[in-house]
């Protein structure tokens, strides 16, 4: 299945790729966070106000059977690589399983090889340490937040969406204004600076992901119409995105770039707060959902973010490419498509270098969508079987929260079968009456699992003492857990602010021999916070050392002599005088010259 699809894609790309001497089109790729298919006016939502996105939808070819992963880091890794997320090391949003493996070539590297200037503005979520950060993986300029969103543990301490501090190419930089405005303003400046050369501009908003912080005026109209919280704020955050998309489209017109710019708009998973769920939560939440004047809009799909049902992973994707007259405005592509198709599609559309891999056995999983977009050779488009799954654990488990997808069917968790042509809401399980279909799709899943599981035992190790980063601040966000309650957020009782007694270990490698200093903290370096007196301990591989924690100290220091070592576990302990222990949520590791 996978090899034949690759041959088909290469053949079609050769047929429809633009001539080598044609002017390279610019690319603006916008991806929002937690906005579902139904969270747009263009898709039938009569409450939300998204005039700019609705206009973009009419100017675009819309992929109406487009699928991503059920949560965000996974989707981003597949988008960047053109491969299934779990095959490139990403099957969770935390626990070190959101770090994209270094041996994978990613989208900006292809564009850079073709002479493009590449910029990222917003959320990265594929590694916060050297050499996994965006400016070390092909982006010439990157302004980004830490972890999976603003206010998560790797992000600058205290960020709350307003006047935050973000990283610009690895250096922290104070910003002014609301996060979405900051991302689009920086992207607009990047476009202005590179208007005379081809550019790839990747805008990845953290909105409308929680926390649902937005200026009150954006929620007021929704509240007045009976939209409950936090959905009113969620809608307001999307309206703010819509405003910025409108401003960006106008800027492209003003700079006379619109006609030669591909604009893609997509989202990273199903809705987080666009649909009320009366069957979930406490009594007050259930009552509020039942009494709400506006229960949200699901576009007729079952479930939400994180689910293996379509509501968890079928999302919007608009592709506007006015320079190619074969890609018509205001048309739909109803065939089964996915996030990893966008890299090979852009390769064909922009005449990028082919996806030559280090190992011929590792082709892209995606297929160029140009035949569907242009209707050339569309009759030869193959019947596809795709798989989506949600693991969110240390080691993937076969048949865990998965869907095998064809244009007609969904096989969920290997046992429930739905005919999407008759039952798009996935209410009637027809598996018992269609055992042959179930067995066929189970066989496709087994083939897929064999394909993606070859490297499940590998880790994305953070190098210590590397010349490019002699100091690395490790964060509990990337703990491989002793306790599954990894503190991924700064706030809340389960977050760092609650000082939970949990622990885990980091996957690291020692890059160079020497003496190393470990500075153990409960808050990031530079934040004044006292740790309880007691004992600190560090263990790396088979070496370990301890030190006393003095009363009133903000960190504990331990030094060790280390030899170069590949994959090794690093763990820390901060133990109080009463004997209660937690890991150091933030640990700075410095190689001493």
Image (tube, rainbow, N blue to C red):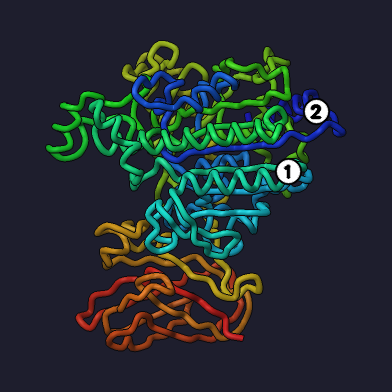
Secondary structure under tag 1 reads loop
Q: Position of residue 388 (x, y in %)?
A: 48, 34
Using the image, tell me which numbered label, if any, was put on residue 360. Answer: 1
Q: Position of residue 366 (x, y in %)?
A: 63, 33
Q: Position of residue 260 (x, y in %)?
A: 72, 30
Mark 1 vs mark 2: in front: 2
Q: Residue at x 37, y 72 (%)?
A: 584
Secondary structure under tag 2 reads loop
Question: On the rendered structure, is 516 left or right of 13?
Answer: left
Which residue occupies the extreme right position in the image? 21
In space, the residues marked 1 and 2 are separated at their CA atoms by 25 Å
Residue identifier under label 2:
18
Q: Position of residue 322 (x, y in %)?
A: 69, 23
Q: Nearer the viewer, residue 299 or 229?
A: 229
Dot 2, how many residues are within 10 Å of its Cα: few (below 14), some (14-19), or many (20+)?
some
Q: Residue at x 35, y 72 (%)?
A: 522
Examine the rendered structure and indicate whether residue 583 appears above or below residue 393. below
């Amino acid at each position: 299945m996978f090899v034949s699809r690759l041959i088909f894609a290469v053949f079609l790309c050769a047929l429809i790729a633009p001539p080598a001497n044609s002017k390279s089109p610019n690319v603006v790729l916008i991806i929002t966070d937690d906005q579902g298919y139904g969270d747009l006016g263009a898709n039938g939502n009569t409450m939300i106000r998204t005039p700019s996105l609705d206009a973009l939808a009419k100017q675009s070819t819309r992929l109406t059977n487009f699928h991503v992963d059920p949560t965000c880091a996974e989707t981003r890794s597949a988008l960047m690589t053109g491969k299934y997320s779990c095959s490139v090391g990403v099957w969770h949003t935390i626990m070190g399983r959101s770090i994209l493996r270094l041996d994978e070539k990613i989208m900006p590297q292809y564009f850079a090889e073709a002479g493009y200037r590449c910029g990222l503005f917003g959320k990265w979520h594929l590694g916060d340490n050297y050499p996994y950060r965006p400016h070390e993986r092909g982006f010439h300029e990157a302004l980004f937040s830490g972890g999976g969103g603003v206010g998560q543990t790797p992000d600058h301490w205290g960020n709350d969406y307003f006047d935050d501090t973000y990283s610009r190419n690895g250096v922290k930089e104070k910003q002014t204004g609301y996060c979405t405005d900051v991302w689009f303003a920086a992207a607009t400046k990047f476009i202005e600076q590179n208007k005379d050369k081809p550019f790839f501009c990747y805008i990845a908003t953290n909105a409308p992901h929680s926390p649902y912080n937005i200026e009150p005026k954006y929620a007021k109209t929704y509240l007045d119409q009976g939209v409950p919280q936090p959905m009113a704020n969620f809608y307001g955050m999307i309206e703010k995105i819509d405003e910025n998309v409108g401003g960006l489209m106008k800027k492209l017109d003003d700079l006379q770039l619109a006609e030669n710019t591909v604009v893609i708009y997509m989202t990273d998973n199903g809705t987080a707060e666009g649909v009320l769920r009366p069957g979930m939560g406490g009594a007050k939440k259930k009552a509020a959902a039942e009494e709400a004047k506006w229960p949200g809009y699901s576009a007729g799909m079952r479930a939400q973010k994180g689910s293996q049902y379509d509501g968890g992973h079928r999302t919007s994707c608009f592709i506007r490419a006015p320079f190619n007259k074969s890609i018509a405005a205001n048309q739909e592509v109803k065939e089964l498509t996915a996030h990893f198709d966008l890299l090979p599609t852009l390769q064909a559309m922009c005449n990028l270098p082919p996806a030559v891999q280090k190992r011929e056995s590792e082709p892209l999983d995606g297929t160029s969508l140009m035949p569907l977009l242009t209707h050339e050779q569309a009759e030869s488009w193959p019947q596809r079987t795709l798989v989506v799954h949600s693991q969110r654990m240390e080691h993937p488990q076969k048949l865990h929260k998965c869907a095998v997808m064809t244009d007609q069917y969904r096989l969920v968790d290997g046992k429930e079968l739905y005919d999407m042509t008759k039952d798009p809401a996935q209410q009637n399980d027809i598996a018992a009456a269609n055992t042959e279909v179930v067995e066929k799709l189970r066989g496709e899943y087994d083939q897929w699992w064999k394909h993606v599981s070859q490297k499940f035992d590998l880790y994305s190790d953070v190098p210590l003492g590397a010349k490019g980063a002699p100091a690395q601040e490790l964060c509990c966000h990337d703990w491989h857990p002793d306790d599954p309650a990894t503190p991924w957020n700064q706030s809340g009782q389960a977050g760092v602010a609650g000082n939970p007694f949990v622990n885990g270990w980091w996957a690291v490698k020692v890059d160079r021999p020497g003496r190393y200093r470990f500075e153990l903290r409960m808050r990031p370096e530079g934040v004044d916070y006292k740790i309880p007196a007691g004992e600190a301990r560090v263990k790396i591989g088979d070496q370990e050392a301890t030190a006393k924690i003095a009363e009133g100290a903000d960190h504990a220091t331990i030094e060790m002599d280390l030899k170069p070592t590949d994959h090794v576990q690093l763990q820390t302990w901060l133990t109080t005088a009463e004997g209660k222990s937690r890991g150091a949520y933030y640990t700075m590791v410095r190689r001493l010259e």
